Image (spheres, helix red, strand yellow):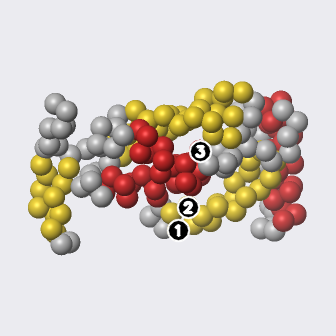
C-alpha cells in the first residue's frame, strides 16, 4: 500500500487546478503543515532540457540562519558564505531553490580557481526552530585543471598551501 493517496482526477493546467491540487495536498499532509496553507509556485528547472515545474510549498518558508560548508579547501568558508549571502539572504528555504543558487553561484567561483570538476553532492537542512533552518553544503573540489583558451590540457595537483 502506497503512503500517498491515489490521484486519478484529470485537471486542466490553470489556477483552479493548482488550487484543487494544493487543497488535496493540504488534506493529505495535514499535521506536517502545522496549519499553513500551500501555495503553487512556477519554477524553471535547468537540467538537460529546460522545463517548468509547479512546486507546492507552505505559504511561509523557513529562513536560512546559518550556512556551513564541508570539504572545501581552495575557497574559505567565509568567501563561500559571502557569495551565497548576496543571493540567498532573506529568502525562504526550499531544497530546489538552494541547490540551484549553489550551482549558479559557487561553481563559477571555483572555476575561477581552475576547479572545473567541483561537485556539491549533499545539501542538508536542519530545523533550528519552526521558522528557520541551518544548511550544510558538502563540497568535492576535485583536481585543479589548466585551461589555455578553450582547450583543456590535463590536471595538476593542488599547489601546497602557502602556510604549509
Q: Are marks 2 and 1 in contact (CB under 8 Å)?
A: yes
Where residue 159 appears, as percent x and y from the top left, is 14, 43
Q: Earlier in the sequence, mark 3 or mark 2?
A: 2
Q: Earlier in the sequence, mark 2 or mark 1?
A: 2
Q: Is residue 121 above or below residue 128?
A: below
Label 3 or label 1, whichever lies nearer to me, is: 3
Q: Is residue 55 left or right of residue 103?
A: right
Label 3 CA crowd tier, 10 Å (few <14, some 14–19, many 20+): few
Label 1 CA crowd tier, 10 Å (few <14, some 14–19, many 20+): few
Q: Is residue 79 above or below residue 71?
A: below
- Per the image, the residue denoted by label 1 is 50
Where residue 21 appears, as percent x and y from the top left, is 81, 53
Q: Quadrant of the C terminus?
A: top left
The answer to whether residue 121 of the structure is visible from this angle is no
Q: CA distance from mark 2 to mark 1?
A: 6 Å
Q: Nearer the viewer, residue 54 or 63?
A: 63
Seen from this angle, which residue lies furthest front? 163
- Per the image, the residue denoted by label 2 is 45
Q: Is residue 63 left or right of residue 17?
A: left
Label 2 CA crowd tier, 10 Å (few <14, some 14–19, many 20+): some
Q: Is residue 64 left or right of residue 116?
A: right
- Per the image, the residue denoted by label 3 is 95
Residue at 53% in and 68% down:
50
Q: Secondary structure at mark 2?
A: strand
Q: Secondary structure at mark 3?
A: helix
Residue at 69% in and 54% down:
55
Amino acid at each position: 500500500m502506497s503512503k500517498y493517496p491515489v490521484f486519478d482526477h484529470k485537471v486542466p493546467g490553470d489556477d483552479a487546478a493548482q488550487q484543487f491540487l494544493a487543497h488535496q495536498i493540504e488534506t493529505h499532509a495535514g499535521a506536517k503543515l502545522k496549519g499553513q496553507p500551500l501555495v503553487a509556485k512556477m519554477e524553471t528547472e535547468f537540467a538537460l532540457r529546460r522545463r517548468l515545474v509547479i512546486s507546492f510549498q507552505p505559504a511561509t518558508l523557513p529562513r536560512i540562519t546559518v550556512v556551513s560548508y564541508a570539504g572545501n579547501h581552495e575557497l574559505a568558508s567565509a568567501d563561500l558564505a559571502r557569495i551565497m549571502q548576496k543571493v540567498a539572504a532573506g529568502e525562504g528555504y526550499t531544497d530546489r531553490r538552494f541547490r540551484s543558487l549553489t550551482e549558479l553561484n559557487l561553481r563559477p567561483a571555483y572555476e575561477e580557481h581552475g576547479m572545473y570538476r567541483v561537485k556539491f553532492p549533499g545539501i542538508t537542512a536542519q530545523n533550528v526552530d519552526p521558522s528557520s533552518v541551518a544548511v550544510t553544503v558538502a563540497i568535492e573540489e576535485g583536481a585543479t585543471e589548466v585551461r589555455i583558451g578553450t582547450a583543456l590540457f590535463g590536471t595538476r595537483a593542488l599547489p601546497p598551501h602557502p602556510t604549509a
